[in-house]
Image (cartoon, rainbow, N blue to C red):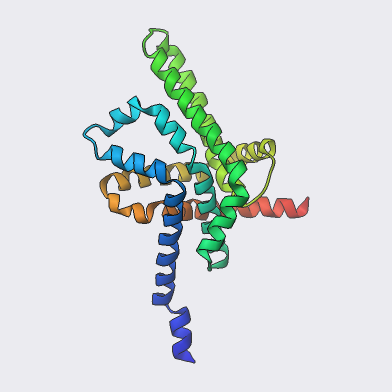
Amino acid sequence: MAKKREFGEGPIYLITNYIFWFVLCNLYFIVCTLPFVIYVVLTFMLKDPYGTFKDTWLILFLLSLLVGPALAASYSTMGKLIREKDLNVTKDYFKYYKMNFKQSFIVWAVQMTVNCLLYVNMSFYSQFEIGTYIKPVILTIGIIINVLLIVALPILSRFYFNFKDLLKCAFYYGIKKFYVTMGTIVIFIIAFIIISYIPQLILFVFSMISYSVMVIFKPVLNEIEKTLKKA
């Protein structure tokens, strides 16, 4: 019995399970965003990838819309893993993908549209002297909206709110738990730097981002759950 318990609950078995869950969740994320992933990977193989992104920003914008629902499903899946220490990745990922698709698509589309408008306006006002004064205002507004929506996606991956209440909740906790907001941004920055130098980690990076984000969001989600139970 001791040997069976060690096989089913030992560190090697646990590590193997986690690796399997992370790889499979990451694979489903890639499958759901395949056109976007292929575009980004091929662009990074060029001599001037950032220049190409700049020239083809509209294509990047349209393909990026696929990311929101896939990321929300990944958040939900990793959140369940954190809570229950167990997963049926295939069943759970696509259940959450379908469940959160509409709202996560809207939230992500708003965020990407804001970024698109931010880029267009920054480029336009860069041509004029008055842009020196207008660009900081545009940038500040863009950052605030992005931070708000970055907080919204992990929340909707666990709870259902209408869009208005979701934004209120994200705004409240984005300020109250500012360290969580900043931590999420830092996670994405670190992941971007790592994948730029070690592209092979694409097999893990998206699920690792999701897991890390849901870990630091745990206090926020627990507080929301307690508030909803009291209401």
Q: Is residue 72 visible?
A: yes
Q: Is residue 220 visible?
A: no
Residue at the image position 28 percent from the left and 34 percent from the top? 49
Q: Residue furthest right?
A: 231
Q: Residue furthest top?
A: 129
Count every numbered label the image shows and give the total.
0
Q: Residue furthest left?
A: 47
Question: In the displayed structure, does residue 151 sit left or right of residue 227?
Answer: left
Where 110 sits versus 88, above or below?
above
Residue 202, horizontal then vertical, whole percent:
34, 52
Where 134 sits versus 204, above or below?
above
Question: In the displayed structure, does residue 79 sit left or right of residue 159?
Answer: left
Residue 142, horizontal then vertical, whole percent:
50, 27
Find residue 44 and report its image quarter.
top left
Q: Residue furthest bottom?
A: 1
Where 18 sits versus 70, above or below?
below
Residue at the image position 67 percent from the left and 48 percent from the top? 160
Residue 229, horizontal then vertical, whole percent:
75, 55
Question: In the displayed structure, does residue 104 sit left or right of residue 1?
Answer: right
Where 56 sits versus 218, above or below?
above
Residue at the image position 66 percent from the left and 37 percent from the top? 163
Residue 135, horizontal then vertical, whole percent:
44, 17
Residue at the image position 37 percent from the left and 47 percent from the top? 191
